[in-house]
Amino acid sequence: MQSFIGTGVALVTPFKKDFSVDVEALKKIVNYVIDGGVEYLVVLGTTAESATLTADEKELVITTIKEANNGRLPLVLGVGGNNTMKVVEELKTRDFSGFSAILSVSPYYNKPTQEGIYQHFKMVAENSPLPVILYNVPGRTASNMLPSTVLRLANDFKNVIGIKEAAGDIVQAMKIIENKPNDFLVISGDDMVTLPMVLAGGAGVISVIGEGFPKEFSEMVRLGLQRKVDEAYKLHYLLADSIDMIFEQGNPGGIKEVFKSLGLSENTVRLPLVNVNEDLAKRLDAFVKKVVN
C-alpha cells in the first residue's frame, strides 16, 4: 500500500468560539497540510476530538474534508471503539466512498486480553470493506497490543495492512518490523520516535506535529526513508522542542494553539479538554514565529 508510506496527519476539528465546527478553518487546514507536502490525511481520529462530536458533526467534518481535498490525497477514516458489534455495524452501514482505508483503535476501557484484542480485530477485518490499519495507543486504551498479536493479525488477514504503533516503545516497534509480512506497514504514532522507527524499517507516521509543520516534518520522513540520516536528524532536532510542547498539556490543545499562531483557526477545544495555559501558549507562539518566519 504505497499510499500510506510517508507522512499522514491526524486532522483536528477546528471549532469557533461558540464551539460549533468551523468549516472554513477546516478547509484552510486541509489545504495547508496538502501544500506542505504530506502524503495522506486521517479523518476523525483522536486528534479530531471525535469523542465529543455528534453524528451530524462527524458527517459535516467528513464532507468538508472530502470536498477540500478534492481527490488530491488518500483519505483514512477513523472507525473504532470498545463495543465490537457497534464497530461492525458502522462498517456494514457507513458510506466509505472517497476513503482508501480505515484506522481502527484497539478497544479502550474494557482492557481485553490479547485474545480479546485479536477476536475484536478479526471481526473488524472480516466486515471492513476497506483495508484496515490497526492502532495501538496504550496511553489511551489502558491495554497494549503485543507484537505477537499484531503479527498474528497481519498474517491471518490480508486486508489488515498496517499498524499505527503509538506505544512509544521503539523496541516493541522493531519486533514487529523484524517479523512482519513484507508488505505490512509499521507506522509511527509517536512523533518523537518517528525518525528512529523509519530508519529501523518503518513506513512513516500518522502525525500531529506534522499538521502544524507539514513542510519540515514530511521532508524529515522522506529523508529518513531515503536513508539520508544526517539531513533527516537536522529537521528532527529543529522540531523536537515543539513535539514536547504540543503534548505537554494534552492533545489537541497544543496543536490548536499552533494553528491559532499560524492564523488558520481558533484554539477552541471542547470539554473535558481545556486550552493550554498562557505560558505554554506563548512558548508555542514563539516557536511558530521562529520556524515559519
Image (spheres, grey):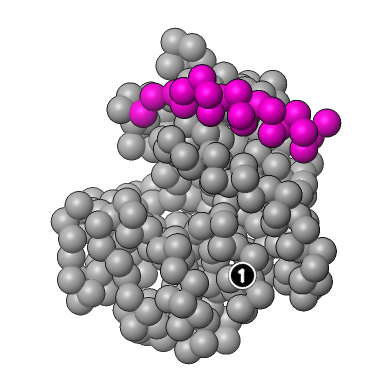
Relative image position of residue 37 (x, y in whole percent): 77, 49
Give the magenta part as a residue range. 273-293
Q: Quadrant of residue 211?
A: top right
Relative horizontal placement of residue 199, taking residue 121 as reference (left or right)? right
- In depth, the one of 109 and 277 nearer the eye is 277
Q: Residue at x 69, y 21 (%)?
A: 263
Q: Residue at x 61, y 29 (%)?
A: 283
Relative image position of residue 197 (x, y in whole percent): 58, 71
Identify the residue at the far front of this view: 279
Relative image position of residue 98 (x, y in whole percent): 58, 49
- How many numbered marks, from 0 up? 1
Q: Quadrant of residue 88?
A: bottom left
Which quarter of the rendering shows the N terminus?
bottom right
The residue carrying mark 1 is 196
Residue 203 visible within the image: no
- In depth, the one of 283 and 185 nearer the eye is 283
Q: Residue at x 32, y 70 (%)?
A: 145
Q: Quadrant of residue 146?
A: bottom left
| 174 lies above or below 231 | below
- In depth, the one of 12 and 267 nearer the eye is 267
Relative image position of residue 4 (x, y in whole percent): 62, 64
